Image (cartoon, coloured by chain):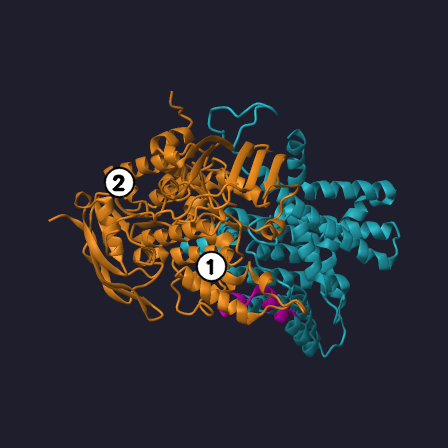
Amino acid sequence: MTDTILRFEDVHKAFFGVTVLEDVTLDVARGSVVGLVGENGAGKSTLMNILGGVVTLDGGQLLLDGEAYAPRDPRDADRAGIAFIHQELNLFTNLTIAENLFIGDFPQRGPIPLLDRGKIRKRAQEALAMVDLAVSPDVRLERLAPGERQLVEVAKALSMDARIIIFDEPTTSLTARETERLFGIINRLHQAGKTIIYISHILRDVMRIADAVAVLRDGQLVASGPVSDFSIHSMIAAMVGREIEQLYPDRTSQPGSEISLELRQLSKTGISYRIDLALHKGEVLGVFGLMGSGRSELARIIFGLDDFDDGEVLIDGKPVKKLSPTRNIGNGMAFVTENRREEGLMMEATVADNLSLAALPAYRTRLVNTVRSGSVATAVRDSVEALSIKVNDAFHREVKGLSGGNQQKVVLGKWLMTKPSILIIDEPTRGVDVGAKYEIYEIIDRIAAAGTAVLFISSELEELLGMCDRILVMGQGEILGAFDRTQFDEEVILRTAFREHVA
Amino acid sequence: MTSHRLTMPVLRNMPAILFVLAFALFSFLDPRFATFTNFSNIASTSAFVGLVAVGMTIVLLTGGIDLSVGATMYITGAVIGMLLQQQVPMLAALAAGVLVGTLWGCVNAFLVAWVGLVPFVATLVTLTMGRGIGLLLTESRQFILPQEMAYAASSYLGIPLPVIMFLIVVVAAMIFLRWTPMGRQIYAMGNNVEAARKAGLNTRRLTASVYVISGFCAALAGVILVSQQGSISAGLGQGVEFDAIAAAVLGGTSLFGGIGSVFPGTVIGVLLVQMISTGMVYLQIDLYLQDMVAAVVIFFAVLIDALRMRLLTRLERRNIRVEKGPDQPATMEKAAT
């Protein structure tokens, strides 16, 4: 029998009468790396929030080293040696790295509550050395790149001398290189005997770093065991409860010949360099690039959120002098941003209000410029149905209560209601589970089949290979290569992105 | 690029630069301006606004606001006036005044941190209600204070007592904000409340304490103002919230929380506001115009602040490419960050 450090026993949790965790029993072996997977809404976060003291459980219990453990707040978890690295970083950009590390528990000089800056500095340096971050602890956090901030969060966990470290989707904002670095550190922590719980949608990563896997579906533990018992396919099957034969729907249409959007030598100092791009009617054009390649920045320029220095933009063959979101929307353009929580949705508003937001002008009465609520309601109902958004009352439920996949469908639906002729989508499946991904791909195919030109920006090459008619590869703000569907080759495209040209 | 590199330090140090500019302008226009007596005057008339502004800065750092400070000053004054009339010893009366004023700050703390009202609304309620209580206590009479009160407005070692008090509070606030865990946690909370909560900080206690501190500072300011004026009237402390917020913002404190400092920030802000109004008196600018000039100055300060924030975020955005020259393609190396 292996040594169990942590045991979840018949854990039960319900929010507002909806069961999110049902009789979950799971043993975590000391010094193991457990990959926790499941679709959004399967209960992974809730389970970890219970462990981290963010929420309390309704039934069952936790056993830590064989003793009952019932944290009431995050500090209890800290004291028990459990560190939680959340998906959104819980750091303060206006403070220094050292201050961030010790914000909850500053070393003080004796009984007077004065900071012991010397000690703080020294301990911060030690913690930073453990994550290979060669930055002074006195640097303000705002000056660090996202990946470096993630490492600060890890250092924080280490400085608390945590025994169990929970990583919740730690790689979503990291570049490939930073991800490698993080895995190196996780490996080292593993060797040092720490227990790690790793939550991720990227199953390849889970296969790589975990030695045990636990799969949640609808609040229940449906599979668990050593990683050697699993394959990516069997994990997906366990997550969705059925075999998914196909990860991508068949494309049902061919791109047209008319050009909807054309960029000629578009440049912006420090951001983009001589971008040439032609997006055809009914085409799904992929833009692939690593983090920091200038993909999203290009989308922002096209949509008129940022300006450009040089070059030409043509919409439907007509040159456009100045781009602005209002004008672009008027020209039939729509933009699904990368960050749905902050930029794409009003989280506190209802599903219906979010869906109808962009299309409201189309539903106004001529005479007094008020909205015809009847037709808006019909349109909302139609799109909830067409996109199969899972919500029991679209007119009263707030968006923040939906799962990631359904939230993303609301963002898509919002723009589809404007019947766009050009649709820019940036990372539409980030943080979305397998089942919802497939549905989103189907929606994209339907949009293209209806004649809309789709610019599909993503850092997941696989989905672009599965969905696009053509793929452009970006790096350092330039187009590094273009590939037709017949030339699709994962390795060649990746090499292009990394600028390792094949001879 | 080069011009930007130049504008950065200029924008970062805007409060100090404005201060020097205003000083140079007034000194040039009126030679009497740059005298020690005048400075002593400016310092001692800014002391009470300064005290309020220190408390206000700490509240603003959490992203909150305290509109009730003027009412707190009035309540403090009213309590002192009433107790003195009852022949209560002066020091006891002053202490009671400060205590009651601080308690009024506790009401704000309760409304914001426990009831969960938006700070703007909560302190608007306590502003209105506080003025009402003050009027009720004094029956809207004016109190003339006994002669001995004026000692509080006297000097010690050549420095006016109010200025000494202001300096003590400034130093205490500096130490509090920079060197205590709570001070750093206030900055943290102003930057990201949600993260603060998840980091295990007691955000409710932190929120509550800034309003209590602000109440205490306003009460002290009340004591100073009544002793300087020698009387307590219904208008006591009216409009001081505007001056205090203006001073804090002029000194670089952000209304969104997390950014700002008591020293040099707010201290410079307070002196700047006071210097401008004194300067206008020297230049004999029409009394009716003075408020407008003050408003215009504050408008520009806030405008510059907004421009500064916008430019700073633009300049600090990381570039994707290293531009070698206008016509060369980027280098093969990954952009340095």
Q: Between residues A55 and A260, which one lies in front from this camera angle?
A: A260
Write down the quadrant of residue A231 in the picture.
top left
- Report, in whole angstroms, how far the alpha carbon at label 1 lies from the one at label 2: 37 Å
Q: What stretch is highlighted in magenta?
A: B111-127
Q: Which chain carries label 2?
A: A
Residue positioned 52% across, 51% down in the render:
B191
Q: Which SS type dominates the magenta stretch? A: helix
- Colour in which chain A is shown? orange
**Location of residue A48 in the rendering, given as x and y in whole percent from the top left corner:** 31, 55
- Establish whether labels 1 and 2 are both on one chain: no
Any part of residue B208 in sight: no
**Location of residue A263 in the rendering, given as x and y in whole percent from the top left corner:** 57, 37
| SS state under label 2 | helix
Write down the quadrant of residue B139 in the picture.
bottom right
Q: Could you tell me which quadrant the N terminus of chain B lies in?
A: top right
Whether residue B109 is situated above or below residue A126 in the rendered picture: below
Any part of residue B166 in sight: yes
Residue positioned 61% across, 64% down in the render:
B120
Whether residue A119 is situated above or below residue A22 in the rendered picture: above
User: Which residue is under mark 2?
Assistant: A209
Q: Which of marks 1 and 2 is in front?
A: 2
Image-based side of B59 in relation to B303, left or right: left
- Chain identifier, cyan in the render: B
Q: Between residues B308 and A173, which one lies in front from this camera angle?
A: A173
Whether residue B334 is situated above or below residue B276 in the rendered picture: above
Dot 1 amino acid type: Thr
Question: What numbered label is drawn on residue B203?
Answer: 1
Tell me the crowding category of disc 1: few under 14, some 14 to 19, or many 20 or more residues within 10 angstroms, Cα based.
some
